[in-house]
Protein backbone atom coordinates (compact mmCIF):
# COMPACT_ATOMS: atom_id res chain seq x y z
CA UNK A 1 0.00 0.00 0.00
CA UNK A 2 1.17 3.53 -0.54
CA UNK A 3 -0.26 7.00 -0.08
CA UNK A 4 -0.30 9.97 -2.40
CA UNK A 5 -0.48 13.64 -1.51
CA UNK A 6 -0.93 16.01 -4.44
CA UNK A 7 1.54 18.69 -5.39
CA UNK A 8 0.39 21.87 -7.14
CA UNK A 9 -1.46 20.64 -10.26
CA UNK A 10 -1.82 24.18 -11.64
CA UNK A 11 1.79 24.05 -12.83
CA UNK A 12 0.95 21.59 -15.62
CA UNK A 13 1.21 23.23 -19.05
CA UNK A 14 -1.82 23.35 -21.35
CA UNK A 15 -0.79 20.89 -24.09
CA UNK A 16 -3.16 18.42 -25.72
CA UNK A 17 -0.85 15.47 -26.34
CA UNK A 18 -1.82 11.79 -26.25
CA UNK A 19 -5.52 12.61 -26.87
CA UNK A 20 -5.97 13.86 -23.32
CA UNK A 21 -8.37 16.59 -22.27
CA UNK A 22 -7.33 20.11 -23.18
CA UNK A 23 -4.89 21.40 -20.60
CA UNK A 24 -3.85 17.92 -19.47
CA UNK A 25 -0.62 16.06 -20.16
CA UNK A 26 0.76 12.66 -19.34
CA UNK A 27 3.39 12.81 -16.59
CA UNK A 28 4.91 10.36 -14.11
CA UNK A 29 2.85 10.18 -10.91
CA UNK A 30 5.89 11.29 -8.89
CA UNK A 31 5.88 14.60 -10.81
CA UNK A 32 2.50 15.59 -9.36
CA UNK A 33 2.36 13.67 -6.07
CA UNK A 34 4.47 12.58 -3.12
CA UNK A 35 4.44 8.79 -2.92
CA UNK A 36 5.06 6.95 0.36
CA UNK A 37 5.26 3.16 0.41
CA UNK A 38 3.83 1.44 3.45
CA UNK A 39 5.95 -0.48 5.93
CA UNK A 40 4.38 -2.96 8.33
CA UNK A 41 5.46 -2.76 11.97
CA UNK A 42 5.97 -6.03 13.87
CA UNK A 43 2.67 -7.70 14.79
CA UNK A 44 3.18 -7.21 18.54
CA UNK A 45 2.15 -3.58 17.99
CA UNK A 46 -1.25 -4.52 16.46
CA UNK A 47 -4.42 -4.52 18.54
CA UNK A 48 -8.19 -4.36 18.27
CA UNK A 49 -8.61 -2.26 21.42
CA UNK A 50 -8.49 1.21 19.78
CA UNK A 51 -4.91 1.81 20.99
CA UNK A 52 -2.76 3.92 18.67
CA UNK A 53 -3.82 4.72 15.10
CA UNK A 54 -5.98 2.79 12.62
CA UNK A 55 -3.81 0.37 10.65
CA UNK A 56 -4.27 -0.77 7.03
CA UNK A 57 -2.09 -2.97 4.87
CA UNK A 58 -4.35 -4.28 2.16
CA UNK A 59 -7.85 -4.06 0.71
CA UNK A 60 -9.56 -6.30 3.26
CA UNK A 61 -11.09 -3.28 5.00
CA UNK A 62 -11.46 -1.04 1.91
CA UNK A 63 -14.94 0.32 1.29
CA UNK A 64 -16.43 2.13 -1.71
CA UNK A 65 -14.51 5.28 -0.81
CA UNK A 66 -13.13 4.98 2.73
CA UNK A 67 -11.69 2.03 4.64
CA UNK A 68 -13.36 0.73 7.80
CA UNK A 69 -11.16 0.43 10.87
CA UNK A 70 -10.74 -3.04 12.35
CA UNK A 71 -7.09 -3.05 13.48
CA UNK A 72 -5.03 -0.46 15.36
CA UNK A 73 -1.27 -0.10 15.75
CA UNK A 74 0.82 1.63 18.40
CA UNK A 75 4.04 1.90 16.34
CA UNK A 76 4.01 4.65 13.71
CA UNK A 77 6.34 3.84 10.82
CA UNK A 78 4.60 5.00 7.64
CA UNK A 79 1.60 7.29 8.07
CA UNK A 80 -1.15 8.58 5.78
CA UNK A 81 -2.97 11.81 6.61
CA UNK A 82 -6.65 12.70 6.15
CA UNK A 83 -7.44 13.03 2.44
CA UNK A 84 -4.42 11.03 1.23
CA UNK A 85 -5.21 8.51 -1.49
CA UNK A 86 -4.47 4.90 -0.59
CA UNK A 87 -3.49 2.57 -3.47
CA UNK A 88 -3.26 -1.17 -2.96
CA UNK A 89 -0.09 -2.58 -4.55
CA UNK A 90 -0.65 -6.27 -3.70
CA UNK A 91 -3.27 -8.55 -5.22
CA UNK A 92 -5.80 -7.32 -6.09
CA UNK A 93 -3.65 -4.42 -7.33
CA UNK A 94 -5.13 -0.99 -7.94
CA UNK A 95 -7.96 -0.70 -5.42
CA UNK A 96 -8.19 2.87 -4.13
CA UNK A 97 -9.59 4.45 -0.96
CA UNK A 98 -9.19 7.79 0.79
CA UNK A 99 -7.71 8.13 4.27
CA UNK A 100 -10.51 9.56 6.46
CA UNK A 101 -8.09 10.29 9.31
CA UNK A 102 -4.43 9.89 10.22
CA UNK A 103 -3.56 6.20 9.92
CA UNK A 104 -0.66 3.78 9.63
CA UNK A 105 -0.04 2.03 6.30
CA UNK A 106 1.67 -1.33 5.92
CA UNK A 107 2.44 -3.78 3.15
CA UNK A 108 1.79 -7.32 4.42
CA UNK A 109 -1.31 -9.14 5.63
CA UNK A 110 -1.68 -8.92 9.42
CA UNK A 111 -1.32 -12.00 11.56
CA UNK A 112 -4.41 -13.08 13.49
CA UNK A 113 -4.99 -10.97 16.57
Image (cartoon, helix red, strand yellow):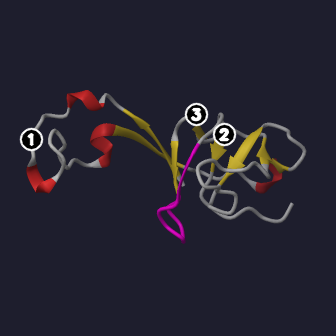
The residue sitting at 27% across, 40% down in the picture is 31
Mark 1 vs mark 3, foreground winner is 1
Q: Secondary structure at mark 2?
A: strand
Farthest-out residue, right? 49
- Horizontally, residue 46 falls left or right of residue 38, namely right
The residue sitting at 87% across, 50% down in the picture is 48
Q: Which mark is residue 15?
A: 1
Q: CA distance from mark 3 to mark 2?
A: 7 Å
Quadrant in the picture for residue 58: bottom right
- How would you rate the neighbour count of disc 2 (Cα within 10 Å): few for under 14, some for 14-19, many for 20 or more? many
Dot 3 or dot 2, earlier in sequence? 3
Give the vertical position of 36 relative to 88 (above or below): above
Segment tinted magenta in the rendering: 88-98
Asked if the residue under mark 3 is in contact with the one under mark 1, i.e. CB atoms within 8 Å, the reply is no
Residue of label 3: 81
Q: Quadrant of the N terminus?
A: bottom right
Q: Position of residue 41 (x, y in %)?
A: 69, 50
Amino acid sequence: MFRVTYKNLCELDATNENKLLKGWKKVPLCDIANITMGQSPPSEYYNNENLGLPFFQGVTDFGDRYPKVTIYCTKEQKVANPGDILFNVRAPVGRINIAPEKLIIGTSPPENL
